[in-house]
Image (cartoon, helix red, strand yellow):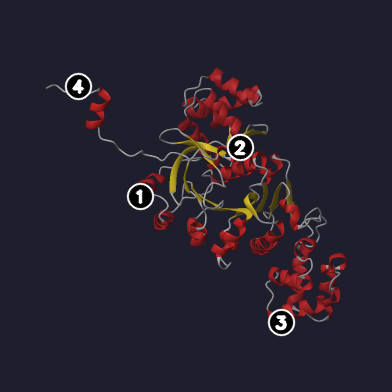
C-alpha cells in the first residue's frame, strides 16, 4: 500500500527545528512605547515601554563615546514629548544641556549671579538652620568643632534666613570669633559664588517639564555634595507628589555611583520611587562603579561598548545575558547595544540593537582654514546613509568624530569620503549642503595633494 504525504508534512517530519536566535519583542504596549532601533538578526523594530516591565528603572553602561548618552538623551526627549513625562537630570558634566534646550526645557546652574538660589532651594523649613548648617559643613568638609560654631552663629537667623542670610555676614562673625582655619574655608566658599544665585525655584518646579541641573562648572567635591543633597531632597519629596501606577517623572543621575554608593538600602529606594510614578535612570562608564543592588533592581539594562574585561565578568555574574551574548559584546560599535528587559512575568529577554535610532542634538565641528563649521551629527549621518554609504562605514566615521573630540579637519572628512568611493563632484555637493564655502573646500583639496602627492 502506498501512503501519500504532503510536502509540508514530509518536511515537518524530517527538518530539524531550532529555537529562534533572538527573542520576539513584546508589542502588547505599543501605545506608549518609545522606538529604540532594530534588532541585529531579524531587523525587528524594538520598542521600550517603561510601564510594561517589572519596574521602570534603567541602567546604561558604556565607555565615553559609545553612544550611551545619545541613547539616554533620545529616550528622555521622546518620553517627555510622547508620554508627557517630567524629566530632572542631575548633570555631572553638562552633557544634557542641549537636550533640555531642544525641548525648550530649563537649564539650571550654581555659582553664578543668574544661577540657582541654593538656600531657597535646599534649606527651607522645616529643616531650617540645621539644613543650612549641614550644607555649609559638607561643602567645606568641616570637623565637629567647626560645625558646632557654624550652627551657633546661624542661630540668630532661625526661621528667617531665606530673606536675610548672607554668607559674608557669617564670614565676618567667624573672623571676629577668631575662627582661624574655618574663616579661610568659608572665604573660599564665598569666592566660589555658590551663594550668589538669584534664581528661586522649589523642588516641585523640577517636576514640571524638562529640567537639567548642570554641575559641570563646579569642582568634584562640591558637585558631590550638591548632587547628593538634591538627590536625597527629591527622594523625600516623592510622597508629596502622590502615588501613581504609571511613570510620571524621570530622575536621571549621571555618573550616579559617585553619590548613590554611600546610600543605604538601595533596593528599598528603587521600590519606593516606583510606587510614586518615578523612573530612575542611571548612567555610568564602568559597571563596577555602581552598587549591585542597582543592577538587580533595574528592569532595563543597556550595555554599550565597554572598556575593561572586568566589566564583562560583572555582567556574567548578574546572569542577565547569556555567554553567547557576552562573547558578542566585544564587537559592539558606536551606537549599538545589548538591551536586557525583565518583563512583568519575570522573564528576562535580551536583544542586540544594531543601531540606536534617536534624536541627535549633538554637533561636531568641521575645521576649515578660516573658521569652524558646526554640523548636526544626526543630519550628517542621515545624509551619508542617503547617498549610499553603508551603515558600518558611517559608524566608522562617527567613531572618528567622537575620538577627535567632535572636531575634525575638513581635509580629513574629504579624505574619508574619497576612501568610501564618493567622487569629487559628489563631495563638493555634499559639503555645500552643510554650508561650507567652495574656497574652504579648494584649500582642503590642496592640502590633501601636498600630503598624498608631495606637491610643493
Quadrant of the image for the C terminus? Answer: top right
Q: Are marks 1 and 2 in contact (CB under 8 Å)?
A: no
As measured in the structure, the alpha-carbon distance from the residue carrying label 2 to the one carrying label 3 is 51 Å
Side (left or right) of 303 relative to 255 = left
Q: Residue furthest right?
A: 164
Quadrant of the image for the N terminus? Answer: top left
Give the residue pinned by disc 3: 145
**Residue appearing at x 77%, y 77% in the figure:** 151
Mark 4 residue element: loop
Give the residue pinned by disc 2: 360
**Residue appearing at x 48%, y 61% in the figure:** 292
As measured in the structure, the alpha-carbon distance from the residue carrying label 2 to the one carrying label 4 is 60 Å
Packing grade of label 4 (10 A; few <14, some 14-19, many >=20) is few
Q: Nearer the viewer, mark 2 or mark 4?
A: 4
Q: Nearer the viewer, mark 4 or mark 3?
A: 4
Give the residue pinned by disc 4: 4
Packing grade of label 3 (10 A; few <14, some 14-19, many >=20) is few
Mark 1 residue element: helix
Q: Which mark is residue 116?
A: none
Mark nearer the N terminus (1 vs 2) = 1
Side (left or right) of 370 relative to 291 = right
As measured in the structure, the alpha-carbon distance from the residue carrying label 1 to the one carrying label 3 is 55 Å
Q: Residue furthest left?
A: 1
Q: Nearer the viewer, mark 4 or mark 1?
A: 4
Compared with 170, 291 (above or below) is above
Dividing the picture into quadrants, the one containing residue 264 is bottom right
Q: Nearer the viewer, mark 2 or mark 3?
A: 2
Packing grade of label 1 (10 A; few <14, some 14-19, many >=20) is few
Mark nearer the N terminus (2 vs 3) = 3
Give the residue pinned by disc 1: 323
Amino acid at each position: 500500500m502506498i501512503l501519500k504525504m504532503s510536502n509540508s508534512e514530509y518536511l515537518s517530519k524530517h527538518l530539524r527545528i531550532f529555537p529562534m536566535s533572538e527573542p520576539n519583542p513584546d508589542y502588547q504596549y505599543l501605545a506608549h512605547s518609545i522606538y529604540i532601533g532594530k534588532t541585529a538578526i531579524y531587523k525587528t523594530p524594538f520598542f521600550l515601554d517603561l510601564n510594561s516591565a517589572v519596574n521602570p528603572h534603567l541602567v546604561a553602561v558604556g565607555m565615553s563615546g559609545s553612544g550611551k548618552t545619545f541613547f539616554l538623551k533620545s529616550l528622555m526627549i521622546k518620553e517627555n514629548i510622547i508620554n508627557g513625562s517630567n524629566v530632572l537630570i542631575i548633570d555631572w558634566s553638562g552633557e544634557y544641556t542641549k537636550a533640555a534646550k531642544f525641548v525648550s526645557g530649563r537649564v539650571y546652574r550654581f555659582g553664578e549671579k543668574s544661577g540657582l538660589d541654593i538656600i531657597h532651594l535646599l534649606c527651607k523649613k522645616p529643616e531650617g538652620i540645621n539644613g543650612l548648617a549641614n550644607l555649609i559643613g559638607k561643602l567645606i568638609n568641616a570637623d565637629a568643632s567647626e560645625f558646632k560654631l557654624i550652627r551657633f552663629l546661624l542661630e540668630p537667623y532661625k526661621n528667617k534666613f531665606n530673606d536675610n542670610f548672607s554668607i559674608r555676614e557669617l564670614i565676618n562673625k567667624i573672623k571676629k570669633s577668631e575662627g582661624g582655619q574655618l574663616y579661610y574655608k568659608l572665604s573660599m566658599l564665598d569666592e566660589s559664588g555658590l551663594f550668589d544665585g538669584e534664581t528661586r525655584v522649589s523642588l516641585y518646579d523640577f517636576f514640571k517639564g524638562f529640567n537639567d541641573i548642570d554641575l559641570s562648572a563646579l569642582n568634584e567635591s562640591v558637585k558631590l555634595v550638591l548632587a547628593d543633597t538634591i538627590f536625597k531632597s527629591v527622594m523625600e519629596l516623592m510622597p508629596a507628589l502622590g502615588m501613581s501606577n504609571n511613570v510620571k517623572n524621570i530622575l536621571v543621575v549621571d555618573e550616579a555611583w559617585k553619590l548613590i554608593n554611600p546610600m543605604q538600602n538601595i533596593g528599598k529606594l528603587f521600590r519606593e520611587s516606583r510606587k510614586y510614578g518615578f523612573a530612575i535612570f542611571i548612567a555610568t562608564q564602568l559597571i563596577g562603579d555602581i552598587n549591585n543592588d542597582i543592577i538587580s533592581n533595574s528592569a532595563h539594562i543597556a550595555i554599550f561598548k565597554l572598556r575593561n574585561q572586568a566589566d564583562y565578568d560583572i555582567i556574567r555574574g548578574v546572569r542577565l545575558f547569556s555567554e553567547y551574548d557576552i562573547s558578542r559584546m566585544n564587537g559592539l560599535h558606536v551606537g549599538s547595544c545589548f538591551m536586557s528587559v525583565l518583563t512583568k512575568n519575570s522573564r528576562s529577554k535580551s536583544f542586540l540593537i544594531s543601531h540606536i535610532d534617536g534624536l541627535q542634538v549633538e554637533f561636531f565641528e568641521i575645521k576649515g582654514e578660516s573658521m569652524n563649521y558646526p554640523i548636526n551629527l544626526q543630519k550628517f549621518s542621515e545624509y551619508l546613509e542617503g547617498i549610499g554609504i553603508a551603515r558600518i562605514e558611517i559608524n566608522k566615521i562617527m567613531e572618528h568624530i567622537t575620538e577627535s573630540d567632535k572636531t575634525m579637519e575638513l581635509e580629513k572628512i574629504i579624505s574619508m569620503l574619497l576612501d568610501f568611493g564618493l567622487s569629487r563632484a559628489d563631495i563638493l555637493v555634499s559639503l555645500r549642503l552643510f554650508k561650507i564655502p567652495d574656497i574652504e573646500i579648494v584649500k582642503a583639496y590642496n592640502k590633501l595633494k601636498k600630503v598624498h602627492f608631495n606637491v610643493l
